[in-house]
């Protein structure tokens, strides 16, 4: 290959990727500062890494009553997750004394902004793909750059020979590039690898432990400081140690080291199972370290200098594509005969519902108006008034249906005068509140024939009241009146109601009870939603999954905890008493109406939302309920509901798993494994699997589901998760 070909290929690659490389390089320099600023924090304790895990756990257990986990990050900082006075807290500690050193390092806004921009250009998966392509182009640029320099210098052996100084730019480009080729190659290669990993093009292996629960021993009980394994592992080897969830032998210590993962019997200290870390996981970990510089001041500095060496050549443009929401709009009049044009910018479609209501009421008032998307902006011959109703997506970008609006305005803005109004939808929880609406407003403001009817009006969290206020004020300014009706949409907010306890069933042996509540205020709740309770004692919200039994009657199953403020408060409620609580929409855990068959998996009180789903089920839809409890007595709380459902064909099958019957420890995951073929068929036919209960149960069930998908369907579990056929609400 001739030198000219290499030169042109190098130039073309640089031109094509220059815009994204500029963004990547600037953010890369900023992000190189982050690991340095983290590393200098005063949380590393001298000689702490030489402590054994036995010593560490002994020290921390003496200081804190309830520890959930212990972690060591790449800076060598030790942090703990603990429960103090019923509240979960995380902070750095001195592992020698247990002394709290300070809160976990929070990402500074500039680093958070730069991270989002650097990883995905705020474009989610599309942006990640672009960054992956840019990393690959950067790799090609680096390789072609090596070839160019080698050829220019007279061969690879003279690569670092003195450079002939032709001019300032040429000289410094060659000299500086030679010094930074290593970090550039590392950044590009690891960037490509991490992108491939993100899109599952490199299969990531997960450690799967096969636990023989029947062989677990509860004796002899050995003090934790005498566990042989913990005595032989230094703290420097630790990544994370999770404490057992409960005091049952089926729960264990999970120890994640730098090269392996171990499950440890909490009573005897015996190794239950041990697995080496997969090679892919090791490579992924090293790729992250090499790409970010985390844990090393020297390498972070080198990466920062490497980022500065990336050429800053700008490209003329790049088209951004979003996944367009499927939206259908019906117009009574064509766009060519309407004098009022309403254009909407929406990502998921909710903003459009408000615009449609506004459009509907304008038509009722006799106005000729047209409703469309902002990406459909064109010449409107009769337009004398334009209304933009625009949501802001992500960190301030245009939503999918408005990404081309600014350019379309430049191309098609008509010459006749018109007035315009802009309504922005967003959330004050985000720093760039309604930013896109302001940008659209400023774009129109540049044209002399466009007159603004006031400033941008903003709507926070889809507030219909705010939007209605704007519509009324706008209508008054036009000499008319509008009566907007609130669209029927489910918003993620709490509806406070008063609930009367109409029934109560207790199982004192396990401190568990089932409440049946009558909603006096009539606020609608769907099975799978959450009951929000805020005790006056501490003012902290607790959420409980609920089942709607019909006629504004809800079922909530609760297990009392010795120090549980809310569970004990609810445990004191008697029939006829009133509970003030809220209903939080949890649409991600609603039973899909389109599913003709569903598998419901729960343990203990996790059955609560399923009681409602079953009660309202159409007999034509087959529901399979797998439920795990200790004994058949545990099932007594729910037996009436289940028996009735079975008799009315609202429940197709009930399959219980009892872990304390005749020394046979049967868990729901065992039942799932046994019925793998049936569950695979349900998934393959578009059915769904819903899981509610403990996190420990969820992990075991998900492991079995992954095996079922692989064995019977030759597909990864993620295939069905992406299609929302796997739904979970675990705690």
Image (spheres, grey):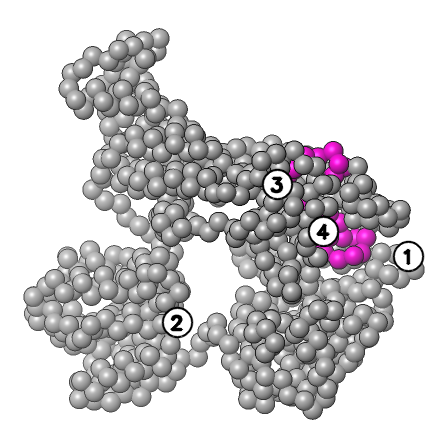
Q: Are marks 3 and 1 in contact (CB under 8 Å)?
A: no
Query: Which range is magenta?
Result: 229-253
Q: Tell me which numbered mark, 3 or 2, is placed earlier along the sequence.
A: 3
Does the segment drawn in magenta span residue 246? yes
Residue position for label 1: 663
Task: Please indicate, yes or no, whether residue 382 appears anywhere in the rendered image.
Answer: no
Residue 348, quarter of the rendered image:
bottom left
Do the residues under discs 3 and 2 have CB atoms within 8 angstroms? no
Q: Nearer the viewer, mark 2 or mark 4?
A: 4
Looking at the rendered image, the disc whose residue lies closer to the viewer, 3 or 1, is: 3
Figure quadrant of the C terminus: bottom right
Which of the labelled discs sits on residue 646, or is there none? Answer: none
Q: What residue is rendered at 67% in x and 57% in y? A: 695
Judged from the image, the secondary structure of the residue bearing numbered disc 4 is: helix
On the image, numbered disc 2 is attached to which residue? 461
> Mark 4 or mark 2, which is nearer the start of the sequence?
4
């Amino acid at each position: 290959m001739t030198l000219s070909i290499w030169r042109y290929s190098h130039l073309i690659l640089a031109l094509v990727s220059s815009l994204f490389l500029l963004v990547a390089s600037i953010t890369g320099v900023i992000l190189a500062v982050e690991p340095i600023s983290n590393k200098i924090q005063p949380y590393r304790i001298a000689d702490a890494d030489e402590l054994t895990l036995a010593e560490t756990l002994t020290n921390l257990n003496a200081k804190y009553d309830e520890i959930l986990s212990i972690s060591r990050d790449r800076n060598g900082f030790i942090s703990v997750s603990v429960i103090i006075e019923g509240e979960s807290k995380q902070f750095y500690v001195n592992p020698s004394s247990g002394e709290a050193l300070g809160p976990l390092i929070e990402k500074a806004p500039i680093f958070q902004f730069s991270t989002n921009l650097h990883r995905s250009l705020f474009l989610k998966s599309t942006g990640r793909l672009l960054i992956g392509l840019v990393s690959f182009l950067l790799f090609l640029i680096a390789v072609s750059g090596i070839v160019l320099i080698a050829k220019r210098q007279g061969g690879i052996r003279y690569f670092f020979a003195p450079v002939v100084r032709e001019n300032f730019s040429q000289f410094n480009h060659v000299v500086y590039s030679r010094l930074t080729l290593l970090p550039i190659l590392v950044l590009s290669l690891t960037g490509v690898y991490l992108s491939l990993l993100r899109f599952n093009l490199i299969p990531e292996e997960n450690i799967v432990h096969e636990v023989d629960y029947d062989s677990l021993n509860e004796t002899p009980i050995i003090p934790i400081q005498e566990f042989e394994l913990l005595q032989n592992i230094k703290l420097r080897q630790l990544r994370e140690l999770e404490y057992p969830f409960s005091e049952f032998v089926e729960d264990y210590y999970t120890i994640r080291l730098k090269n392996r993962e171990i499950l440890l019997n909490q009573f005897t200290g015996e190794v239950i199972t041990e697995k080496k870390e997969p090679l892919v996981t090791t490579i992924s970990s090293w790729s992250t370290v090499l790409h970010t510089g985390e844990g090393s001041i020297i390498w972070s500095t080198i990466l920062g200098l490497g980022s500065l060496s990336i050429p800053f050549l700008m490209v003329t443009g790049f088209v951004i594509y979003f996944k367009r929401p499927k939206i259908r709009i019906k117009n009574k009049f064509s766009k060519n005969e309407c004098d009022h044009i309403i254009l909407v910018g929406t990502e998921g479609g909710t903003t459009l519902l408000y615009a449609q209501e506004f459009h509907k009421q304008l038509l009722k008032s006799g106005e000729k108006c047209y409703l469309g998307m902002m990406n459909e902006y064109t010449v409107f011959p009769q337009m004398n008034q334009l209304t933009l109703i625009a949501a802001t997506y992500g960190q301030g970008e245009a939503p999918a249906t408005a990404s081309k609006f600014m350019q379309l305005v430049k191309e098609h803005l008509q010459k006749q005068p018109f007035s315009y109004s802009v309504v922005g939808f967003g959330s004050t929880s985000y720093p760039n509140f309604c930013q896109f609406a302001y940008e659209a407003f400023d774009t129109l403001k540049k044209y002399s024939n466009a007159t603004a009817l006031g400033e941008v009006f903003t709507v926070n969290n889809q507030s219909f009241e705010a939007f209605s206020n704007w519509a009324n004020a706008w209508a008054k300014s036009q000499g008319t009146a509008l009566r907007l009706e609130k669209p029927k949409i489910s918003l993620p907010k709490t509806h406070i109601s008063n609930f009367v306890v109409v029934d109560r069933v207790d199982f004192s042996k396990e401190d568990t009870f089932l409440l049946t509540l009558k909603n006096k205020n009539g606020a609608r709740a769907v099975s799978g939603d959450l009951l929000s309770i805020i005790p006056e004692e501490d003012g902290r919200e607790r959420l409980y999954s609920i089942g709607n039994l019909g006629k504004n009657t809800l079922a909530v199953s609760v297990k009392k905890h010795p120090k549980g403020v809310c569970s004990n408060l609810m445990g004191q409620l008697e029939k006829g008493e009133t509970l003030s609580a809220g209903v939080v929409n949890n649409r991600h855990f609603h039973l899909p109406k389109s599913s003709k068959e569903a598998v419901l998996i729960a343990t203990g009180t996790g059955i609560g939302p399923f009681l409602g789903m079953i009660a309202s089920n159409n007999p034509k839809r087959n529901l399979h309920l797998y439920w795990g409890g200790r004994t058949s007595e545990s099932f007594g709380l729910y037996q009436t509901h289940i028996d009735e459902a079975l008799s009315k064909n609202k429940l197709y099958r009930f399959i219980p798993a009892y872990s304390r019957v005749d020394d046979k420890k049967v868990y729901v995951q065992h039942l799932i494994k046994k019925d793998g073929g049936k569950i695979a068929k349900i998934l393959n036919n578009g059915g769904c699997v819903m899981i509610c209960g403990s996190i420990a149960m969820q992990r075991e069930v998900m492991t079995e589901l992954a095996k079922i998908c692989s064995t019977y369907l030759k597909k990864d579990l993620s295939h069905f998760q992406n299609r929302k056929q796997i739904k979970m609400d675990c705690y």
